[in-house]
Image (tube, rainbow, N blue to C red):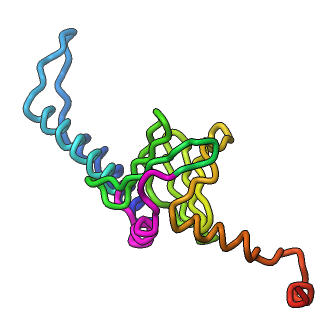
Amino acid sequence: MIKTLLATVFLSVVPFALLAQTPAKVDGNLKPLTASRVEIKTKANQMAVGIQAAEAALSPAELAIALRVYQGKLPCELGAFVTLTADATAPGYFNVQLKNQKYRMFPVETSTGAIRLEDRKVGAVWLQLANKSMLMNQKLGQRLADDCKSPDQVVVAEMLIKNPAPSVLESPGEVAAK
């Protein structure tokens, strides 16, 4: 919400700043940049950088999600590995790598409590559940890596094998009878 508001303010100010300047007249030949045109271009670039910084800023909730992301080289099914490392230059952002594919991801809030990282440019999504994680490409509708597990997730997965969670399709009486 704040990102959108800041971007809207910046985008509404740029046209007025540009209209306040008088354009250089063109007599068939292009005139070299004048000091005022250079100033306009500089201000526009600074505003664009400000908009990008506002969009890149994460909310406190997103930063809290980032603290729960498992990092390191996680083994996956079929002998694959996914490597997650925190981006040292941008808090809350992660570099995710699968073989030669690299993604720059950030946390996204979910209603289920699952940890979700996204790289919206390429459509990549990292989902981290209690017992496993997976890397998907939303644009292609494919799982790139599945059943990736940190040491903590291995423990939870083993517990679920020994003591499976009750089915949501069973009635509470059936669960108690077991």
Q: Height in image: 23 above or below 145?
A: above
The quarter of the rendered structure image containing the C terminus is: bottom right
Marker count (numbered):
0
Q: Residue furthest left?
A: 35
> Residue 114's image quarter?
bottom right
Q: Is residue 138 above or below residue 6?
A: above
- What residue range appears in magenta? 55-74
Query: Where in the figure is residue 42, as x and y percent of width and height?
Result: 17, 39
Residue 43 percent coordinates (x, y): 19, 43
Measured from the top left, where is residue 40 in percent x and y? 18, 38
Instruction: Locate the N terminus by quadrant.
Output: bottom left
Task: Identify the residue at horizontal 22%, vertical 9% (top origin).
Answer: 28
* Residue at 30% over, 55% down: 90
**Residue drawn at (18%, 14%), measured in percent from left and top?**
30
Which image quadrant for residue 173? bottom right
The residue shown at (45%, 69%) is 68
> On the rendered structure, is 96 left or right of 40?
right
Front one among 2 and 165: 165
145 and 140: which is toward the camera: 145
Q: Residue furthest top?
A: 28
Q: Is residue 67 magenta?
A: yes
Q: Is residue 72 magenta?
A: yes
Task: Find residue 83 and report its horizontal and vertical position in percent.
Answer: 44, 48
